[in-house]
Image (spheres, rainbow, N blue to C red):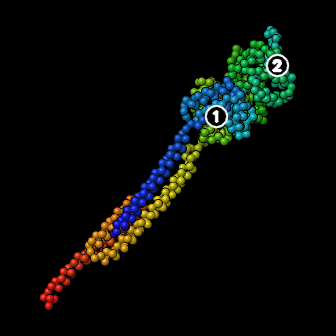
């Protein structure tokens, strides 16, 4: 074999090693990329989700509950955290939700809700308490007091003082009056702030009073006690049409005020009173992830007692009724937890796992094809090596010396080393190596036969020389 051929083979070997090195680097780069993407996705999935929740007005019971809720969520470092967004009121909070600027909002059920709003939890139930004083303002408390107003129908032509400046309370009173057969425009209304209880009790123009809040509300109890001191024992007005109101408008519920629920001396009322309630809700848009809504619901009720220790009003947080034909449906994430139909991890992500397996299978097939493609030169070279060895078999059979045989053996040794290196790198398969072995075996047999023939043929020249030196030949 010439030096030029040897140089070419060395150059080819260098190029093959370089290609194999580049292929290895490519595989490593793809592996690191896949690992980095998986690690990034896992890190992102394990991060707590921060939900923006709108609530208002500042300083209200709802605002205090949400602030305490956000602190409890942050201290637990679980899957969900809250970022309170303070609004001027419940109407503004719901408007932020409708505009997509927040994920959750706290609002009263009888307010105008965004079209796709759904309930997550009930913050509290507000009960309507209507009562009338037993004597007019300024009259002496001597003698037996008699209430001018004994039922809601008597409110026609009267004036009602409502605690709370929200327009929703006045709208609720109109619903109650209409159900009782009283024209709402026949009843005058004046709103008082929660800090104006004394002014409400001393106002001589008021014939009745209305409060909307939890049964343990200090504001309601204080208002009843203040009017009792100024105007005599209260007469509680039953809302006899409460069931009809609830049937017509599912945002309201028919309820009863139990006896002696308002802590006063004496305790009032002395008997149960029929009324209606309206709930303050935590609502979300329908588009909120089912998984996120379920996680928020579970975390809220897991921490409810801890929140109630900071803000007692949090004890009123209850789950919504998923079976009730409510005007505002329950979010599917919360409903799944409540009804026990929440899908398991495999139910939720099983399709993704199958997709991942298919993707990995596709990546493996692609990798095998790429490997086959990148190693095509090595396979072609291996075929060329086999053909070279087959060609040497003919040369071996016509070799005239052991030096030629030795040179061809050295050439084949180099081919064998290169072939084994390709096999170790995965460039050729076992079937190709087996075919190479058959050719190599044929070459070795040819070498053995030719070497034996040459050894046997070395005696012929000696015999010729002996015959030439005999006496006969000299004659």
**Which numbered marker is on residue 132?**
none
The residue located at (19%, 83%) in the rendering is 464
Q: Is residue 78 left or right of residue 258?
A: left
Quadrant occupied by the N terminus: bottom left
The reply to whether discs 1 and 2 touch (Cβ–Cβ < 8 Å) is no
Q: Secondary structure at mark 1?
A: strand
Q: Is residue 75 left or right of residue 475?
A: right
Quadrant occupied by the C terminus: bottom left
The residue located at (44%, 64%) in the rendering is 377
**Seen from this angle, which residue lies furthest bottom?**
475
The residue located at (68%, 20%) in the rendering is 218
**Which numbered marker is on residue 207?**
2
Query: Whole-Å distance between the Cαs marked 1 and 2?
Result: 43 Å
Q: Position of residue 198 (x, y in %)?
A: 75, 15
Which residue is denoted by mark 1 in the rendering?
52
Marks 1 and 2, the one that precedes in the sequence = 1
**Residue 415 visible in the shown view:** no
Q: Position of residue 172 (x, y in %)?
A: 78, 29
Is 22 drawn above or below residue 449 in the view shown?
above
**Mark 2 burial class by Cα count in 10 Å: few <14, some 14-19, many 20+:** many
Q: Secondary structure at mark 2?
A: loop
The residue closer to the viewer here, 60 or 373, is 373
Q: Is residue 458 left or right of residue 353?
A: left
Q: Position of residue 232 (x, y in %)?
A: 77, 14
Is 297 drawn above or below residue 155 in the view shown?
below
Is 49 drawn above or below residue 150 in the view shown?
below
Q: Is residue 346 left or right of residue 416?
A: right
Q: Position of residue 289 (x, y in %)?
A: 63, 41
């Amino acid at each position: 074999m010439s030096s030029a051929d040897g140089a070419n083979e060395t150059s080819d070997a260098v190029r093959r090693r370089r290609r194999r090195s580049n292929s290895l680097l490519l595989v490593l780069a793809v592996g690191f990329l896949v690992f980095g993407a998986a690690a990034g996705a896992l890190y992102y999935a394990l991060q707590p989700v921060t939900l923006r929740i709108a609530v208002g007005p500042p300083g209200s019971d709802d605002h205090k509950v949400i602030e305490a809720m956000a602190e409890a969520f942050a201290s637990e470092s679980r899957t969900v955290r809250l970022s309170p967004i303070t609004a001027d009121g419940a109407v503004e909070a719901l408007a932020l939700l409708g505009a997509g600027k927040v994920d959750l909002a706290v609002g009263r059920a009888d307010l105008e809700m965004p079209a796709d709003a759904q309930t997550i939890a009930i913050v509290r139930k507000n009960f309507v308490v209507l009562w009338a004083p037993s004597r007019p303002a300024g009259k002496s408390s001597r003698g037996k007091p008699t209430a001018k107003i004994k039922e809601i129908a008597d409110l026609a032509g009267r004036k009602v003082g409502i605690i709370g400046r929200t327009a929703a309370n006045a709208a609720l009173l109109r619903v109650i009056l209409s159900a009782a057969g009283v024209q709402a425009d026949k009843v005058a209304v004046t709103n008082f702030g929660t800090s104006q209880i004394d002014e409400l009790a001393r106002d001589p123009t008021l014939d009745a009073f209305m409060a909307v809040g939890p049964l343990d509300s200090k504001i309601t109890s204080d208002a009843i006690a203040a009017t009792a001191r100024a105007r005599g024992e209260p007469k509680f007005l039953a809302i006899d049409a409460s069931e009809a109101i609830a049937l017509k408008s599912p945002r309201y519920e028919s309820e009863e005020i139990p006896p002696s629920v308002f802590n006063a001396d004496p305790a009032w009322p002395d008997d149960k009173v029929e009324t209606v309630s309206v709930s303050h809700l935590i609502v979300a848009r329908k588009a909120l992830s089912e998984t996120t809504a379920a996680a928020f619901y579970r975390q809220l009720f897991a921490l409810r007692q801890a929140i109630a220790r900071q803000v007692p009003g949090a004890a009123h947080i209850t789950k919504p009724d998923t079976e009730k034909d409510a005007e505002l449906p329950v979010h599917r994430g919360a409903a799944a937890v409540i009804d026990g139909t929440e899908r398991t991890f495999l139910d939720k992500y099983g399709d993704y796992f199958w997709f991942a397996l298919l993707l990995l299978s596709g990546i493996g097939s692609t990798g095998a094809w790429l490997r086959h493609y990148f190693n095509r030169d090595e396979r072609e070279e291996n075929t060329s090596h086999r053909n070279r060895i087959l060609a040497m078999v003919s040369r071996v059979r016509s070799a005239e010396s052991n030096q030629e045989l030795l040179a061809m053996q050295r050439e084949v040794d180099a081919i064998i080393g290169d072939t084994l290196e390709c096999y170790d790198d995965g460039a050729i398969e076992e079937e190709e190596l087996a075919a190479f072995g058959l050719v190599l075996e044929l070459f070795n047999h040819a070498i053995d036969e030719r070497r034996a023939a040459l050894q046997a043929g070395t005696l012929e020249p000696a015999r010729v020389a002996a015959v030439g030196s005999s006496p006969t030949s000299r004659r």
